[in-house]
Image (spheres, rainbow, N blue to C red):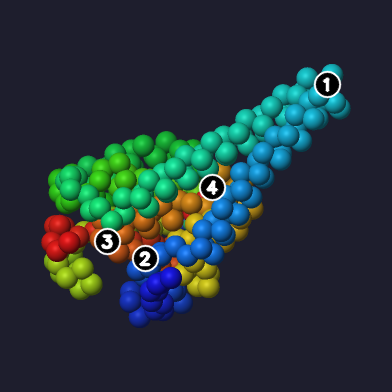
Amino acid sequence: VMCEVTVTPMDLTKGRAAGITIEDRSRDEETGQMRRDFVANVSHELRTPLTALMGFIETLRGPARNDPAAQERFLDIMGREAGRMNRLIGELLSLSRVEQDERRRPVESVDLAALLRSVVTTLSPSATAAGVRIEAEVGDGQVTLPGDADQLVQVFHNLIENAVKYGGSGGVVRVQLERLEHEPVLRGPAWTVTVEDEGEGIEALHLPRLTERFYRVDAHRSREQGGTGLGLAIVKHIVNRHRGRMKIESTRGKGSRFMVILPESAGRA
Ligand code: ADP
């Protein structure tokens, strides 16, 4: 397994105090052990809601048989658990698709600016409902680069949704699009999308593992909010497929910043 992660204190890169930034350039090469762990994780993640469902079915048959109020409550919970299983299966399928065509670079071209505007528009109502304001600094022009539109929608949908989810009520989520004349690692012009929140941040020790499948800082909290723990793994594979880079910076108590850097042109294979 080759995994390259650089950890640099955030204050060295951005002049901010006490933060940490990691850069994820890992290319997961699946080993037998990883595959077994993955299957064990999937089974566990599916079994948790399933066990709850089976328990409620028993309760509806027995103790709650003549209690319409309890039935109503249990059916609500059962609906949520079934929804969770459905979401998990959707994300597993999307992860496996993305992993499958990771070696094939996207050939179509996309308008990244329009794509970001549309993701922000889609997520704004639920952000507002959660007491979070999304501020987009994307401009109103066109930004064309090689990319798979559906997959890039998934990337920014996941990142912005996380920022809203973990950003905390009353906060602002900032979405920025900037051009880099010369990106040193990609060795050419590139576009950076930054998704920044004002949440509680992520402790440094978690950062290098954040994009692993099913890795969560707080599994209970993630589940409560309907998370599957697969979002960032999907993001990473899509960014890899686009031959881009991803950086995560976070300061405890201040917030997190997720950056996706995509090459402006196809360049070398
Ligand atoms: P989940 O479905 O749990 O949100 P993700 O793969 O999207 O799964 O994220 C993995 C974990 O990373 C989350 O469970 C959470 O602990 C952490 N995380 C992701 N984004 C943020 C953020 N903006 N602020 C704080 N923690 C985050």
Which residue bears the numbered disc 1? 65
x then y, percent, for residue 135: 34, 49
Of labels 2 and 3, the one closer to you? 2
Q: Earlier in the sequence, mark 3 or mark 4?
A: 4
In this figure, which residue is indicated by the disc labeled 4? 227
Local secondary structure at mark 4: loop
Q: CA distance from mark 1 to mark 4?
A: 32 Å
Side (left or right) of 165 relative to 72: left
Is the residue under label 1 in contact with that under label 2 (CB below 8 Å)?
no
Instruction: State whether label 4 is within 8 Å of ligand 1.
Output: yes
Return the mark for residue 76: none
Disc 2 to disc 3, C-alpha distance: 12 Å
Mark sitting earlier along the chain (1/3): 1
Up/down of 1 relative to 177, above or below? below
Q: Position of residue 43 (x, y in %)?
A: 61, 48
Few, some or many residues within 10 Å of mark 1 (<14, 14–19, 20+): few
Q: The disc labelled 4 sits on which kind of residue?
A: Gly
Please state, as top left, top right, bottom left or bottom right, where the N terminus lies in the image.
bottom left
User: At 53% from the left edge and 36% from the top edge, which residue is drawn?
Assistant: 86
**For mark 2, what is the residue?**
27
What separation in Å lies between label 3 and label 4 (alpha carbons)?
25 Å
| Contact, mark 3 vs mark 4 (Cβ under 8 Å) | no
Residue corresponding to mark 3: 244
Q: Is residue 163 visible?
A: no
Residue type, label 3: Gly
Side of 82 relative to 135 (left or right): right
Q: CA distance from mark 2 to mark 1?
A: 53 Å
Q: CA distance from mark 2 to mark 4?
A: 24 Å
**N-term-proximal mark, 1 vs 4:** 1
SS of the residue at dot 3? loop
